[in-house]
Image: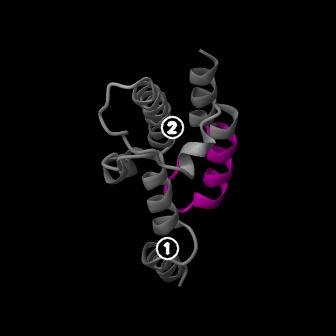
Amino acid sequence: MATKNIIADLNKGENLTGTNYDIWHKKITFLLNEQELFEHLTTIMTRPPEGNTAQSRRDLEAFETWSKKDRCARFTLLSCMHDDLIGAYEHCATAKEMWDQLRFDFGGTSVTRLRSLVLKFERTR
């Protein structure tokens, strides 16, 4: 229940719009760290091969636990975006894939970021 309250509180503020990536990135990092989901932004786990051994069952259980937490991380990322952006990122298979794509699209000097800055500059003229 506390997790839902944290997300609700974060959503009262500004969601990711594309122009506020830097502060959004920091807030989401803090939020996912608090939820013990930060590792899902940096690692990917692949489904283990089928097997009937005790180790195979433990590996599958670990993967299923990881998958459930990864879905929570993905949901958190999506729920903290502006509605117009959700459709562009909901296809990402993992939280890490989404995180990396968001960094590419909005962090640093991506084409999208440069275009946004050019449009902003042209509006001020």
Mark pair 1, 2: CA separation: 24 Å
The answer to whether residue 119 is above or below residue 23 is below
Q: Nearer the viewer, residue 11 or 57?
A: 57
The reply to whether residue 58 is visible in this rendering is: yes
At x 38%, y 26%, the residue is: 53
| Residue 14 in sight in this render | no
Please provide percent x and percent y for residue 61: 44, 25
Question: Splitting the image into 4 quarters, where does residue 4 fall?
Answer: top right
Residue positioned 43% across, 78% down in the render? 111
In the drawing, what numbered circle is on residue 51?
none
Residue placed most toward the observer, 57 or 30: 57
Say whether marks 1 and 2 touch (CB < 8 Å).
Answer: no
Which label was assigned to residue 73? 2
- How far from the left and from the top, in percent, is residue 83? 39, 44
- Residue appearing at x 56%, y 67% in the figure: 107
Q: Which residue is mark 1?
A: 113
Q: Position of residue 47 (x, y in %)?
A: 36, 40
Q: Quadrant of the N terminus?
A: top right
Q: Is residue 110 left or right of residue 28?
A: left
Magenta stretch in the rendered image: 13-31
* Element assignment for label 2: helix
For image coordinates 52% across by 63% down, the residue present is 103
Three-letter code for the amino acid on which mark 2 is drawn: Ala
* Rendering coords of residue 115 (x, y %): 44, 78
Q: Is residue 7 left or right of residue 85?
A: right
